[in-house]
Image (cartoon, grey):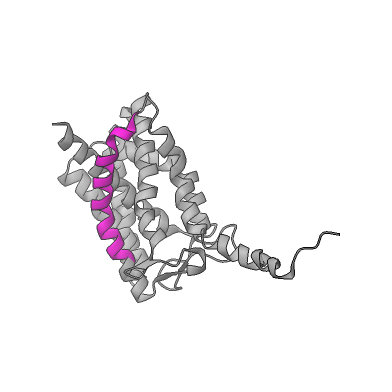
């Protein structure tokens, strides 16, 4: 009878060790899953978004800087923290490498989707809702910021969204805010799926953890409602910068 030498058994890692290795790729896989379909579709001859990779990279980097600073500060203060078991263990400025990649992968999927929808569908009718959208959002965000000024995540999430909207509408004079907001709503299923995993949906414990008392405590599944507002600012600013650099490079 053929026998496997005792020493050769060491080649095969225990099941729990293999599971631990796979677990460390969780956050990276979330980023990859969010971007892979859009990345492949970018090379479609009807879309050719690959020609705009440079423009996107520049705009996403500009937007990523303040959000990464915010992220690093919140992490340092313990407003939120990361379970490094779900990461490769590489950290920069106190943030996992995967968290850095998040600010290019997620915006890529968002900007690509916005670009395609505007290319193939006429959403210009939504532009007529700009004034009422900004007016209503300003009231809601201002009230939330004033009522919950002691909850730092709530305050900064609502404050950043408020400043973003006021800048885009009154200073930059952008007419596409309502159109972009409609696309953001269409992106919600994907947003909830990605953020759901990051906040603990479908896995034993959250990748991103939040300190109680720093946010409202209202969640969509496992996702703090502030994440939706945070994501809205990130989305709008990426669209704005992408459009800005696209115009600059086309001149």
Q: Is residue 114 above or below residue 219?
A: above
- Please provide percent x and percent y for residue 91: 38, 67
Residue lying farthest to the right in this orientation: 1
Q: Left or right of 92: which side holds 3? A: right
Q: Nearer the viewer, residue 30 or 185?
A: 30
Residue 73: in magenta span? no
Q: Is residue 167 above or below residue 93?
A: above
Q: Is residue 26 above or below residue 152?
A: above
Q: Quadrant of residue 99?
A: bottom left
Asked if residue 174 can be seen in this view, the reply is no
**Bounds of the magenta segment:** 48-71
Residue lying farthest to the left in this orientation: 251
Asked if residue 107 can be seen in this view, the reply is yes
- Please provide percent x and percent y for residue 230: 36, 56
Name the residue rendered at 33%, 60% in the picture: 157
Q: Tell me how many marks there are.
A: 0
For the C terminus, give its image quadrant: top left
Name the residue rendered at 21%, 44% in the picture: 169
- Please provide percent x and percent y for residue 167: 20, 49
For the N terminus, give its image quadrant: bottom right
Q: Nearer the viewer, residue 1 or 217?
A: 1
- Please provide percent x and percent y for residue 71: 33, 65
Q: Quadrant of residue 10?
A: bottom right
Q: Main secondary structure of the magenta part?
A: helix
Q: Left or right of 191: which side holds 47? A: left
Residue 66: in magenta span? yes
Q: Quadrant of residue 127?
A: top left
């Amino acid at each position: 009878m053929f026998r496997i030498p005792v020493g050769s058994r060491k080649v095969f890692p225990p099941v729990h060790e293999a599971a631990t290795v796979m677990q460390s790729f969780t956050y990276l896989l979330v980023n990859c899953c969010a971007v892979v379909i859009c990345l492949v579709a970018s090379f479609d001859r009807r879309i050719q978004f690959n020609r705009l990779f440079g423009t996107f990279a520049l705009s996403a980097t500009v937007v990523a800087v303040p959000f990464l600073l915010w992220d690093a500060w919140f992490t340092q203060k313990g407003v939120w923290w990361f379970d490094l078991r779900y990461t490769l263990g590489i950290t920069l400025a106190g943030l996992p490498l995967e968290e850095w990649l998040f600010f290019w992968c997620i915006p890529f999927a968002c900007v690509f989707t916005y670009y395609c929808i505007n290319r193939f569908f006429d959403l210009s009718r939504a532009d007529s809702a700009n004034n009422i959208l900004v007016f209503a959002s300003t009231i809601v965000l201002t009230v939330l910021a004033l009522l919950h000024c002691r909850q730092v995540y709530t305050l900064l999430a609502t404050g950043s969204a408020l400043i973003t909207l006021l800048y885009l509408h009154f200073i930059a004079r952008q007419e596409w805010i309502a159109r972009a907001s409609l696309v953001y709503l269409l992106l919600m299923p994907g947003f909830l799926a990605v953020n759901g995993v990051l906040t603990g949906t479908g896995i034993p414990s959250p990748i991103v953890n939040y300190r109680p008392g720093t946010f409202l405590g209202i969640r969509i599944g496992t996702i703090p409602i502030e994440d939706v507002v945070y994501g809205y600012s990130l989305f709008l600013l990426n669209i704005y910068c992408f459009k800005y650099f696209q115009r600059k490079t086309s001149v």
